[in-house]
Image (cartoon, rainbow, N blue to C red):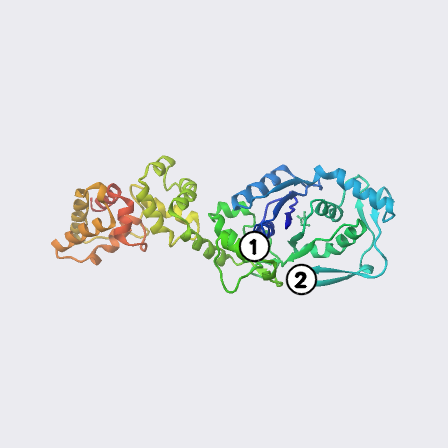
Amino acid sequence: MVRVRFAPSPTGYFHVGSARTALFNWLFARHYHGTFILRIEDTDRERSTDESIDQIIESMTWLGLDWDERYRQTDLTPDHLQAAEQLMENGQAYELDGAWWFKVPADGETVVHDSVMGDVTFRHEEFKDFVIRRSDETFVYNFVVVVDDSNMKVTHVIRGDDHLINTPKQVLLYQALERPLPQFAHLPLILGEDRARLSKRHGASSVLEYRQMGFVPEGLINFLARLGWSHGDDELFDRDELIRLFTLEEINRSAAVFNHEKLYWTNQQHMKRLDLEGLAGLVRPFAVAEQSATAEQWDAIDRDRLHLGVDLLRDRSKTLVDLAKVLEILFAATLEPEEPIVLEDRQRVLVAAVADALAEANACEFTPDAVHDIVQSVLAANDAKLKEIAKAVRLCITGRKVGPGLFEIMSAAGQDLSVGRLRALVR
Ligand code: GLU
């Protein structure tokens, strides 16, 4: 039975590198119908904070990475002490200056068999004896991680490759404690676009910042999955596909590059795939924050109109923030056009006639087809073509030069706003 754990240290922001590690463990557990453990490694009491724990929980919950068991490492101190005493009693550890030291065998080597990195050999002469328990009676990461992983019957240790260097020490501890080894899988480093190790310098790096920027969980999950894992040339996966396809064999050995353009693109694709009700729910707080609508306006708007607007406007939106901004088209009495609208007399007459005809329409039937028929009949009666007024009408109705189909967006904006904006233009 597969048992994996994600073991974050709650010492700062929950960044995307940690989220990638959490995701790979979660996918692996779900793929094999195993158990996903969240273990908060808070043994460094000086640096661990409750805010950081909250942020881990909030980020994972938002990403939909649910855990089956949860532990806090400081609750497990009796287990650590028991294992350390075992090593002291067996003579595999000794006390010096109040600290307890693990005795590394002087000769030979330890080979780490890693599912991703292959066999990696470490010669013992490269290590010195190391501390497992400090003189202040706190335990050291390399020791507690072994005790916890083996007590929790963890079968696979999947984590960032910065920990590969720790693994031979951990293997020696497993052997000294006579406990079975898990399978190790070290994930390739994540680099920024400049090929330096990903850090704050490369822009937003905490998961909650990405949430704030309007990324949808499915988009970020897909993007993170592709950081070091691939399945053929496919780029887009939903959650269930990732669970079905994810295996350690398809993890790449080479470093992954965090490409922002691809992140936005992936997010956009997932926004297109979401059902309209779900997407509307996700964009609501952003629309309120961007002042495209008040919460009351948002909740009162006809659902069909809202869904039509969301559907029309999401194609050009890379994030929920983008979408929230353009959704003002559905709510604002008037919009500031991105360039001035200049009308000649004939255009003014046509726009006024269109506005009057639209005002006569049955409010319940303000569909794209109905708007099309009304506008076209006004134009036909005046021997005019749509292109004579299309640009002005678009700028007036949407505030923008380009956008979705004009009749559709007018239908989404609704009769009152469409008529009101056109009348304000020709007043
Ligand atoms: N607390 C360690 C970290 O956050 C865990 C490493 C591991 O997974 O063993 O890096």
Disc 1 marks a residue whose amino acid type is His
Q: Residues within 10 Å of mark 2 (few under 14, many from 20)?
A: some
Q: Is residue 70 left or right of residue 353?
A: right
Say whether residue 19 is left or right of residue 333: right
Q: Which type of secondary structure does the marked residue at label 1 adopt?
A: helix
* Label number found at residue 202: 1
Q: Who's the residue at 48% across and 50% down the image?
A: 218
Q: Nearer the viewer, residue 171 or 57?
A: 171
Residue pushed farthest bottom? 233
Residue found farthest to the top: 296
From the viewer's side, name the closer residue of 176 and 308. Answer: 176
Point out residue 6 in the picture as x, y percentages from the top left corner. 63, 47
Q: Quadrant of the C terminus?
A: top left
Q: Nearer the viewer, mark 2 or mark 1?
A: 2
Between 101 and 323, the residue placed more toward the observer is 101
Q: Read off the residue under disc 2.
A: 117
Residue 46 in sight: no
Residue 68 visible in the displayed image: yes
Whichever of labels 2 and 1 marks the residue nearer the N terminus, that label is 2
* Mark 1 C-beta closer than 8 Å to ligand 1: no
